[in-house]
Image (cartoon, coloured by chain):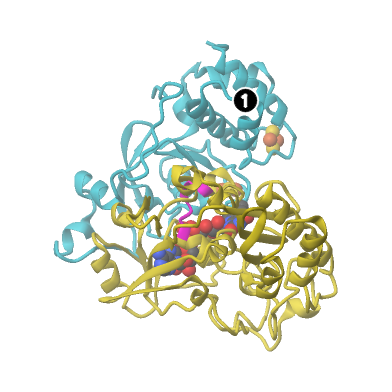
Amino acid sequence: MKPFTYVVPQSLAEACEASQKPNTLLKGAGIDLIDRMKERLQTPEQIVNLLPLKDELAGVAVEANGELRIGALTTLTQLEQHQALAAPAFDGLRLATGMTATPQVRNRATVAGNILQFTRCWYVRSEAFHCLHGGRGPTCLAMTGENRYHSVLGWSDCVRVHPSNLAPPLLALDAEYSTRLGDKVRRRKFSELFPADPRAQNPEHTLEAGEIVTAIHVPAQPAGTRSAYCESREKLTFDWATTACAVRLVLAGGVITAANLVLGAVAPVPLPREKASALLVGQKPSAALFAKVAEMAYAGASPLAHNDYKLTIGKAIVRQALDEAVR
Amino acid sequence: MTVPPDRGVSRRSFLKGSAVAGIATTGITAAAHATAPSKPASFGPGEHEIVLLVNGKERKVKVETRTTLLDAVRDGLDLTGAKKICDRGACGGCTMLLDGETITSCLTLAMDAVGHELQTVESLSDGDKVHPLVQNFVHCDAMQCGFCTPGMVMSSLACLQKRGKPTDAQMRHDLSGNLCRCGTYGRVMEAIQRTAVGGGK
Ligand SMILES: Cc1cc2nc3c(=O)[nH]c(=O)nc-3n(C[C@H](O)[C@H](O)[C@H](O)COP(=O)(O)OP(=O)(O)OC[C@H]3O[C@@H](n4cnc5c(N)ncnc54)[C@H](O)[C@@H]3O)c2cc1C
Ligand code: FES
Ligand code: FES
């Protein structure tokens, strides 16, 4: 790690001011950031430590309108164990959180940091590789190289995947996020957090420099809402997903009246699959329906030399998530 | 010897004192005094002294802002129980308890631990006297090369503190952040169980 100045703000306002300085990075627990700094992928002059703002920015609360407010600095352990997440509507989010990394990581990692973590592509995460997304070379090395953990959908000039466990279930729940940039407070749809065109060298998220995520908001879910999250991976623990699927369904009288299906770990951004979701609406759950939906979720996929297994496993994971949601 | 908290008593304190509070109460950092009170405290990039609350004692240690907690404890305080194996959060060899919860100290900045209670594996022995959990690791032969063991012990301790008498599934869950290339998991679970029922005293 290169030396840096470490700022301990005493309020959000102070953090906002300090983060305006050029070449400054924000730090949650630092699990992703310190890793990248050790690799010298990031060499900031200044780090603003957000952890002292936990009194303001950590914790889960149910608002008067039933909305869930998740503080940006809430740890994954806190989120998983919060009683507000015990409702079936939040099964997907709770399970995705509990499956992340290891107990040690979940005890520290913040919700915002999980969502904003950098891709795990082994080329871009190693300074030694002259890759396009890292701004170190002319091409995406994974496209023709070792790409078994890379994208099968939604890629153009770079095949990295978005690694966050929390992003797919939050998208499926129609979440929103609040930020603060200087004096400006903004609240936007969760889908706006990710770039519409995730090309190489485009940032992984749409936040401006120094913009601080303060909270995630999950709207109150209608009666009959069910959700699920399933993922495939190579190890039972310690591992990022190879494919993931988050679903949210509303069931009324045995019929699905609303559906959101989101794929994770298969594209450069967490990927809502509207057409697959639309197939579910107005239907009764059945194995045949779910198989059709799984096909649609991966329609248009372009796998690489070493990752077409993601289509087979990914579709099975979609069916499993749907089965679990209606069980 | 620092007496570990009783089983079942949770020391978890998520919203406890921030680093700021820690710095303010211990008042140890020249840089903190040098900055005007209305401005956020800022440290580094050079070396400075912080106070860490390690195994119940306040310990001064010189760090840079980029020093990890693992390096501060091993190199600065000469507590070399916790091991640096992957240095990337991917093995659990550096596991310590911060405010009673397991963490990977290799991906935690030393500065971030100021004002929090840190417990390392050294807290479990005092000369020849060892904590029952450690005694049970020996009794159950729960190590082979021993490299993962300090981290395993700390995750086992957290498991016992949180659960009292953990089930198999709970032990698997709580040990799922510690890799052992020698495959001692089964015996580690026996050592935990033996401790839970009062063995090794
Ligand atoms: C062994 C291992 C296995 C893992 N497995 C998984 C897995 O299966 N699934 C998964 O999802 N993750 C996994 N992870 C990644 C881990 O979950 C993330 O690194 C962690 O959640 C990041 O949170 P943090 O608070 O440490 O973020 P930091 O490292 O502090 O920050 C990450 C990024 O977000 C920015 N940031 C943080 N907070 C804010 C904020 N409030 N506002 C604006 N920007 C902010 C930072 O500037 C930085 O760029 C794993 C990690 C390890 C070490
Ligand atoms: S050395 Fe910290 S987890 Fe491996
Ligand atoms: S005893 Fe050798 S790694 Fe665990």
Q: Quadrant of residue B147?
A: top right
* Residue B66 horizontal side relative to residue A164, left or right: left
Q: Quadrant of residue A316?
A: bottom right
Please name whichever residue, A168 or A141, is drawn nearer the observer in this view of the structure. Answer: A168
Q: Check disc 1 and report the residue beneath it.
A: B167
Instruction: Decide whether the magenta segment is chiefly helix, strand or loop.
Output: helix
Name the colour assigned to chain A in the rendering: yellow
What residue is shown at x 57% (from left), y 49% (from top)? Answer: A91
Residue at disc 1, secondary structure: loop
In percent of width and height, residue B79 lies at 46, 37
Left or right placement of residue A295 versus residue A202 in this view: right
Residue B90 lies in the magenta stretch: no
Q: Please give the name of the residue rendered at 77% of the width and 60% of the height, measured from the top-left corner.
A: A290
Q: Is residue A301 above or below residue A259?
A: below
The correct choice, above or below, for A154 with respect to B174 in the image is below
Q: Which residues are magenta?
A: A106-111
Total number of numbered labels? 1
